[in-house]
Amino acid sequence: MSVVPAEVLPGGALGVEETAPGGGAAAELGPRARLWPSLAAVYRAQLSRARVARIPLLFVATFQSVGIMIMMRGVVDSRGEAQSVVAGSSVVVVAYVALNLLAQYFGQLRASGGLDHYATLPVPPASVVLGAAAAYASFTVPGTLVTAVFGCVLFGLPLGNLWILVAVIPLAGAALAGLGAACGLLAPRPELATLLGQLGMSAALLLGVLPPDRMPGVIRFARDLLPSTYGVEAYARTFGAHPDWAVVLADLGVCAGVGVVSLAVATWAYRRAAVR
């Protein structure tokens, strides 16, 4: 066997430093994994993992929202109510995936010991939560667009400002995904995580789709506490002839702020669940 000096190896391989106390060899550790490359790696892994269930997931989420709009077609009697129904039904697709399914996923991951696998990886905890949330939220884009276009055609609303969904989907998705991940990670049993996800999605469905003018005062207050409401309001305001873009940006800003807080809570919950 011949020995080749490390200096002549391709790429300049690093050798082992003989600087450890007692004459031992101390191996030089690699650089710490950074957030964004780790997030991209987790996102790609989660996207390929969930690709098998993409078509059934999109069908269920979209069919549910389209069915709601068809039922509400004979109930609403004003343009303002139609705007709320279409905007709320579109955001419900995001809530179904980002809140409901993500809560179930993290609940099952915690119960099955899958968090131990992620805990051994040299990636920041935030990248695991953000990568999984972004992967699940990505599946909502086609269903949300189909629901929005169908609703506008069904209720005779303009399609000119449909581009606002480019901001509504990720911001509302981030807020709801953080809540879903936190529910799944903090729930002591996966059944409870599933229940919390279902309750959250039901709240987004009832409080987001129904016109607010017909709600009692207490229900309106509960609606204001739901982060997806501000995504619904931002989208609904763009149907007007002269939208107040300052108010639209303010609603999107609330979604963004809640998204940062909810994802931070989900990251803390991941650290807590991973070390138990």
Image (tube, rainbow, N blue to C red):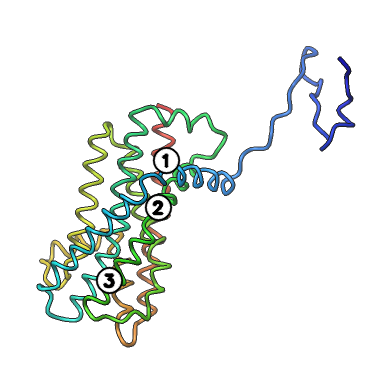
Query: Tag 1, which secondary structure?
Result: helix
The residue carrying mark 1 is 268
Q: Residues within 10 Å of mark 1 (few under 14, many from 20)?
A: some
Residue pictured at 38% horizontal, 79% vertical: 245
Q: Is residue 20 above or below residue 226?
A: above
**Percent position of residue 57, x then y:** 31, 50
Kind of residue sitting beneath label 2: Val
- Are discs 1 and 3 less than 8 Å apart at CB? no
Q: Does 229 appear above or below 96?
A: below
> For this rendering, which residue is in front, 194 or 156?
156
Tell which tag, 1 or 3, sits nearer the viewer. 3
The image quadrant that residue 80 belongs to is bottom left
Q: Earlier in the sequence, mark 1 or mark 2?
A: 2
Q: Is residue 19 left or right of residue 38?
A: right
Q: CA distance from mark 2 to mark 3?
A: 33 Å
Q: What kind of element bears circle 3?
A: helix
Q: Which residue is mark 3?
A: 150
Image quadrant in which the N terminus is located: top right
Q: Which residue is mark 2?
A: 261
Say whether residue 93 is left or right of residue 1. Answer: left
For label 2, the crowd category at 10 Å Cα-Cα, with few meaning under 14, some 14 to 19 and many 20 or more, is some
Report if the CB atoms under discs 1 and 2 are less than 8 Å apart. no
As helix, strand or loop, the secondary structure at mark 2 comes to helix
Q: Which is nearer the N-term, disc 2 or disc 3?
A: 3
Which residue is outermost to the top?
Answer: 22
The foreground one among 268 and 148 is 148
